[in-house]
């Protein structure tokens, strides 16, 4: 049977975090009542003239240069024509033939693993500026009408288009992480998926392994999370491979991802670029970015994840893989470095606290979509308070735990258990310890817990008596659980050992 290799390309739409919109002075802040952040320009009134926001160009340049793009000079704005109720002008101002940046590249892990080594290059076709459309709302209680909120109309977007250089879902995931991390390091977007600040379109084709020519291309729209992209990519690889192996011919088409069915379905046959009738926007002059501007932005580019990872290995002796994990999340790396540099926490302690409990919390938060549902996922109970702290606050939390642990008020287990609690509740470590009590150092109290655990786990106790060391670990773990991490593990260890060895009370 012929083996097929996927070629996957991604378009990433990212909402820039400028104060005002791209072609007018309306504010971009989220959460305002509908249609209160609007003007004739972003409402699309005839004759209203757009004026380009300089900050949008500055942000776009940061991204384009960080992704090693060439800068088009001039860069041209064009009208992309289509008709839809969220777009009263009947065209979106975008860029096609002369995008702000083009011909760049990023390197991502070939197997999706964050450790360096085995890097795979993904070419960036272009990075271009465009405006967002309005938001359509379909009220549940009124099926006959739809509503339009123009607050989002004219919000600046940066579209980052890749070549179809990815060959697996793992590479796609690594690429999305790299782009999101770059946006956060560059400070140009909050990149919050649950707020629709990152949206994706994927193109997927399959080619026979020995052929250089790409197969029939299928585009997938409606991808609003990493999970949706990965689901769609896996589904399409499987669907197309099956079809090809059974001799079917694939059609070039656009498909929609259905989050509920976890499948793609046909949407319409592909329009060509001609259908959008791109033509130069006559109301905007060509954008000329001079050498000085480019040089200034280039010089001001921050240290990015990879470079930072290398520095953390050098400065603190972290291993490469841990440094890569840590720097993959800017807020995590910021918190750890602040804890070390400004609060004197030992590097190993800060790093371990983050890589274990800190990242477990982050994974839950991103899987659940919102911090609030993450709080629910962690404990099974609803918590109304969620962590909204900065890396400086998180550094303080790490420092507090370190101090309490050094003073013997907390065991390492309890400190690790408390960390996500702090993130979830926003309470300080000291307050939480006060509420729940410090480490149990009292022999009698601990002894009672140890006796209970031994009685409840007679088999494990018997196994340890017969010489199975693993059983001891299990029993100590049970005591830690019973005491909610408040026992001193070393004391527990000695007590269990003592009771089971000599039968002493
Ligand atoms: Zn406006
Ligand atoms: Mn676009």
Image (cartoon, grey):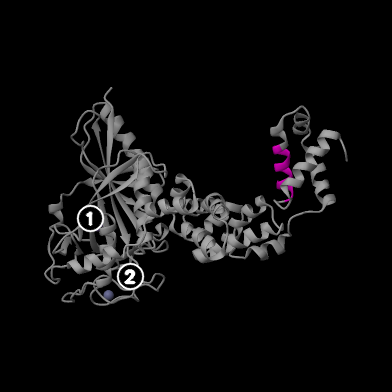
Residue 255 seen from this side: yes
Q: Residue at x 83, y 50 (%)?
A: 443
Quarter of the picture for ligand 2? bottom left
Q: Which residue is mark 1?
A: 69
Q: Residue at x 41, y 47 (%)?
A: 227
Placement of 221 over or under 235, stated as above or below: below
Q: Which residues are magenta?
A: 473-483
309 with respect to 269 (left or right) = right
Secondary structure mostly seen in magenta is: helix
Dot 1 falls on a residue whose secondary structure is: loop
Of labels 1 and 2, earlier in sequence is 2
- Which quadrant of the structure image shows residue 50? bottom left
Q: Residue furthest right?
A: 505
Q: Residue furthest top?
A: 1
| Residue 201 x %, y % | 29, 50
Instruction: State whether label 2 is within 8 Å of ligand 1.
Output: no
1 with respect to 74 (left or right) = right
Magenta span has 463? no
Placement of 489 over or under 3, stated as above or below: below
Give the camera-side residue of 72 and 227.
72
| Residue 450 x %, y % | 79, 43
| Residue 271 x %, y % | 17, 49
Residue 389 seen from this side: no
Q: CA distance from mark 1 to mark 2?
A: 22 Å
Instruction: State whether label 1 is within 8 Å of ligand 2.
Output: no
- Which quadrant of the structure image shows residue 165? top left
Say whether marks 1 and 2 touch (CB < 8 Å). no
On residue 18, which mark appears? 2
Q: State the quadrant of the N terminus.
A: top left
């Amino acid at each position: 049977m012929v083996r097929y290799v996927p070629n996957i390309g991604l378009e990433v739409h990212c909402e820039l975090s400028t104060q005002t919109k791209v072609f007018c002075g309306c504010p971009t802040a989220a959460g305002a009542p509908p249609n209160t952040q609007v003007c004739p320009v972003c409402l699309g009134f005839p004759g209203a003239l757009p004026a380009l926001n300089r900050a949008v160009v500055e942000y776009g340049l940061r991204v384009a240069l960080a992704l090693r793009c060439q800068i088009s000079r001039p860069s041209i704005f064009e009208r992309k024509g289509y008709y839809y109720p969220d777009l009263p002008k009947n065209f979106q101002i975008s860029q096609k033939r002369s995008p702000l940046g083009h011909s760049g590249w990023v390197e991502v892990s070939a197997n999706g693993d964050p450790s360096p080594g085995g890097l795979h290059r993904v070419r960036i076709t272009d990075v271009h500026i465009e405006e967002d459309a309005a938001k359509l709302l379909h009220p549940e209680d009124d099926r006959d009408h739809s509503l339009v909120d123009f607050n989002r109309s004219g919000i600046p977007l940066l579209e980052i288009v890749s070549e179809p250089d990815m060959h697996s879902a793992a590479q796609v995931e690594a690429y999305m992480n790299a782009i999101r991390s770059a946006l956060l390091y560059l400070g140009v977007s909050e990149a919050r998926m649950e707020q629709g600040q990152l949206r994706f379109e994927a193109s997927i084709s399959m080619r026979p392994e020995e052929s250089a020519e790409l197969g029939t291309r299928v585009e997938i729209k409606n991808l609003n999370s990493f999970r949706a992209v990965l689901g769609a990519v896996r589904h399409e690889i499987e669907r197309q491979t099956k079809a090809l192996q059974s001799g079917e011919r694939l059609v070039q088409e656009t498909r929609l991802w259905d989050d509920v069915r976890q499948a793609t379905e046909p949407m319409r046959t592909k329009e060509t670029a001609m259908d959008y009738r791109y033509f130069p926007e006559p109301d905007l002059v060509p954008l000329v970015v001079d050498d000085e501007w480019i040089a200034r932005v280039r010089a001001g580019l921050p240290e990015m994840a990879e470079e930072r990872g290398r520095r953390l290995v050098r400065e603190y002796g972290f291993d490469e893989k841990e440094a890569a994990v840590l720097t993959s999340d800017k807020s995590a790396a910021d918190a750890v470095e602040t804890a070390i540099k400004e609060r004197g926490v030992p590097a190993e302690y800060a790093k371990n606290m983050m890589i274990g409990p800190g990242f477990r919390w982050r994974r839950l938060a991103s899987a659940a979509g919102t911090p609030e549902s993450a709080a629910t996922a962690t404990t099974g109970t609803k918590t109304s308070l969620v962590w909204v702290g900065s890396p400086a606050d998180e550094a303080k939390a790490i420092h507090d735990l370190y101090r309490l642990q050094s003073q013997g008020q907390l065991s390492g287990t309890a400190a690790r258990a408390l960390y996500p609690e702090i993130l979830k509740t926003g309470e300080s470590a000291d307050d939480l310890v006060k509420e729940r009590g410090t480490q149990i150092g009292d022999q009698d109290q601990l002894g009672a817990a140890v006796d209970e655990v031994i009685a409840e786990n007679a088999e494990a106790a018997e196994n340890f008596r017969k010489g199975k060391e693993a059983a001891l670990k299990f029993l100590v773990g049970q005591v830690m659980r019973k005491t909610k991490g408040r026992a001193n593990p070393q004391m527990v260890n000695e007590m269990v050992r003592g009771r089971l060895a000599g039968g002493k009370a």
